[in-house]
Amino acid sequence: MIEVLDGLKDVIACESKISRIELIEDKAILEYRGYDIRDLAKNATYEEVAYLLLYGELPKKYELQDFKIELAERRELPPQIIGLLTHLPQYTHPMVVLRTATSYLGSLDRAKDLKTKEENIEKAKNLIAKFPTIVAYYHRIRLGKNLIPPTLELSHAGNFLYMMNGLEPSKIAERALDADLILHAEHELNASTFAARVAASTLADMYACVVAATGTLMGPLHGGAAQEVMKMLREVATPRRAEEYVKKKLEKGDKLMGFGHRIYKHVIDPRALILKELAMELSKTGNPIWFEISEAIAENAYKYKKLLPNVDFYSASVYANLGIPDDLFVNIFAMGRISGWLAHIIEQYENNKLIRPRAKYIGELERKFVPLDQR
Ligand code: ACO
């Protein structure tokens, strides 16, 4: 049997046409379907990127118009899902809510096992459209506030902020969230996407695959890191304390949340660079403290352990300045990543081979069974 590679590091598990990560000297390239994320984050909308990921091509003007309408028309939730959100305990983490509601959506879909091209796209549009509504509705329900139904008038990002706050968002806020969702939309075989592909490889239905991905994204070593970053920013509280905090954490052997990456070891995560600009931009009209603390932490993380920030690091100050509560940070990640997950699930269905690796057995061998009354 072949040597075990810890955490499947550098293992190529499948071929894919969805995104490319390439490290060239001191630069990292990240492309979705061949388009650089810097161009997409600057010039495209989340709807355009979701279309690109699902269909493989950028939409023409009329195709985007139709796609936007199709998403907007699918935003409202069935009454059963609203009932579920109302009945879940108020202390339920919003990611558990998203995972549970996704599963429930599956139980309501009589065509859940159909996997034609049209059906896959239909389910994908439905899930992309409904994710933000699940998040916003649950948030308002747990606060005891009335629900703000989705509007057809606003973009995917703008409508989410509207459903959260009941007010039309500023252009800056809408654009910042839009760019953030684009940057989170896809990242090759990250842990949650891999989980989705493993589930898809058994030909499980699309909802089951998304539940697997949602559950995997929650962990603090993956999407859960942004919430932990915010905890750190709050603990540090002022840029002056950043050096002492970072030094102590690293001396204890603790991980600094929002730093390090399986692929971007010696080059910076290209998404972090764009998010840093976004965080800086938002700090000019919002509260500058989160960005200032972030900068002080980043400087010391590099000074003491050459650690570079990942996508989750500057996301925290972006979300804080968009007024998003800490425990919704992972949900925002999921609202972006859902289109990448779906593109991978569809790609897996279309060229399927069961994913079933082997384990190297290192336990005891050939033990003699001892009956219960003699143990
Ligand atoms: N803080 C302190 N040290 C770190 C960090 C960190 N955040 N990240 C890596 N290191 C160190 C490790 O201690 C290790 O050092 P050593 O060789 O002296 O023991 C070395 O860098 C390699 O780290 P590993 O954890 O082995 O690298 P791996 O590729 O397995 O893990 C991971 C990557 C899980 C992302 C890791 O960097 C980490 O735990 N980061 C913090 C959590 C985080 O921000 N997760 C979000 C990642 S991005 C995403 O999922 C969207």
Image (cartoon, helix red, strand yellow):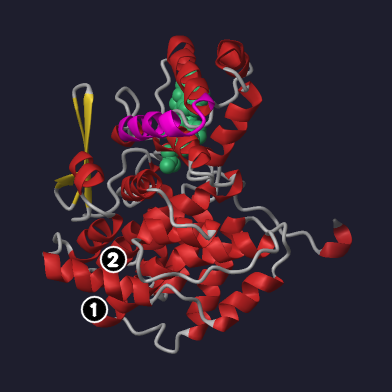
Q: Horizontal and vertical percent for residue 246?
A: 56, 16
Q: Is residue 268 above or below residue 110?
A: above
Q: Residue at x 30, y 49 (%)?
A: 188
Decide if residue 356 is in sight here.
no
Mark 1 CB near ligand 1 (8 Å cut): no
Q: Furthest-right residue in view?
A: 373
Question: Is 86 on the left-hand or right-hand side of 15?
Answer: right
Q: Callout 1 environment at 10 Å: few (<14), some (14 to 19), or many (20+)?
A: few
Marks 2, 1: nearer the viewer: 1
| Amino acid, disc 2 | Gln
Which range of residues does the magenta coloring cover? 273-289
Residue pointed to by mark 2: 348
Q: Nearer the viewer, residue 274 or 352?
A: 274
Q: Residue at x 53, y 73 (%)?
A: 103
SS label for mark 2? helix
Looking at the picture, how far across and down is residue 264, in whole percent? 33, 30
Q: In which quadrant is the C terminus drawn?
A: bottom right
When the figure is inspected, residue 188 is found, relative to residue 215, above or below; the finding is above
Report the residue marked by disc 1.
Answer: 117
Relative horizontal placement of residue 211, taking residue 62 as reference (left or right): right
